[in-house]
Amino acid sequence: MKLRPWDWAGVGVALACAALFVRLGVWQVHRLQQRRARNASIAARRALPPIVLGATAGAGGGELAPDSVQDRRVTARGTYDYSAERLWAGRTYEGTPGVAVLTPLRLAGGGAVYVDRGWVPSPDGRHIDQAAVREGDTATVEGLAFAVPRARGDVDVTRLKDSVSYPLYAFIIQETPYIRPSDRPTVRRLYRWPAPVLGDGPHLSYAIQWFSFAVITLVGTAALLGKARYESTHPTI
């Protein structure tokens, strides 16, 4: 069978599309590998012994850069300064609007660190009765350290240094959910954030999707060419 010019054009377009689909699939595989490597690094950092603030750093927190504590477990003990509390508005949890409550914890050795104490439901996603979600003055906090901002709208504590009278660490502690019943928050409607899940994400399914598109394109093109060849050798009477 002799292909007509438009047949060649169609084959060329199909091959170009198939090549693009394969390239996109390979890109998603690379993204998956990068994500798994990143997750392995995070898991290894979380498995390290917890950093005890006040025991390993100076009063100003200058000895602990955000990169050095990112995704590390941290323990801190001190007194909450509710007057400098901040809200991260527009935070939803399981589809319910609310806010995240971030409160500076003044450490016994000096300095302070902002603690994301958890999420509180809010009809407008912006306002809550902050006094109603206070947990007392003295607290021992266990959580994960994160550089800020964690996402759009997060409280950037590095910009709050001039608004308080004490040195601030340049990262926050996201308080983890309680494990022991005695650690349950005494405040109703205050929910600790679960630790971020280290999953593969959608990259594998996307890769399979793109490779499937490539196979469908090639098989479909071959089928159409086969049909055209059959019709050219078996003309309809």
Image: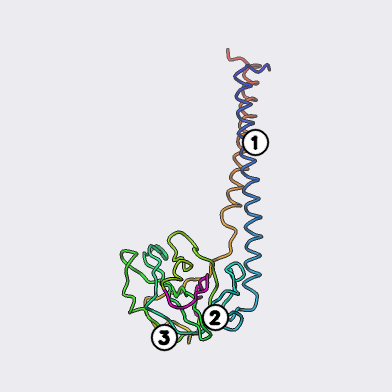
x and y percent of residue 140 in the render?
50, 84
Circle 3 residue: 137
Q: Are marks 2 and 1 in contact (CB under 8 Å)?
A: no
Quadrant of the rendering where the N terminus is positioned: top right
Q: Residue at x 37, y 67 (%)?
A: 98
Select label 2 or label 3 by which is in front: 2
What amino acid is labelled 1 in the image?
Answer: Ala
The residue closer to the viewer here, 81 or 51, is: 81
Q: CA distance from mark 2 to mark 1?
A: 58 Å
The residue closer to the viewer here, 224 or 113, is: 113
Select label 2 or label 1 by which is in front: 2
Residue furthest top as drawn:
237
Circle 1 residue: 19
Q: Residues within 10 Å of mark 3 (few under 14, many from 20)?
A: few
Q: Are marks 2 and 3 in contact (CB under 8 Å)?
A: no
Q: Is residue 142 left or right of residue 35?
A: left
Circle 2 residue: 59
Q: Residue at x 43, y 71 (%)?
A: 162
What amino acid is labelled 3 in the image?
Answer: Asp
Q: CA distance from mark 3 to mark 1?
A: 62 Å
Where disc 2 sits, the SS reads loop
Q: Is residue 26 left or right of residue 85?
A: right
Colouring: rainbow
Range of the magenta residues?
A: 164-178
Mark closest to the chain's N terminus, 3 or 1: 1
Select label 3 or label 1 by which is in front: 3
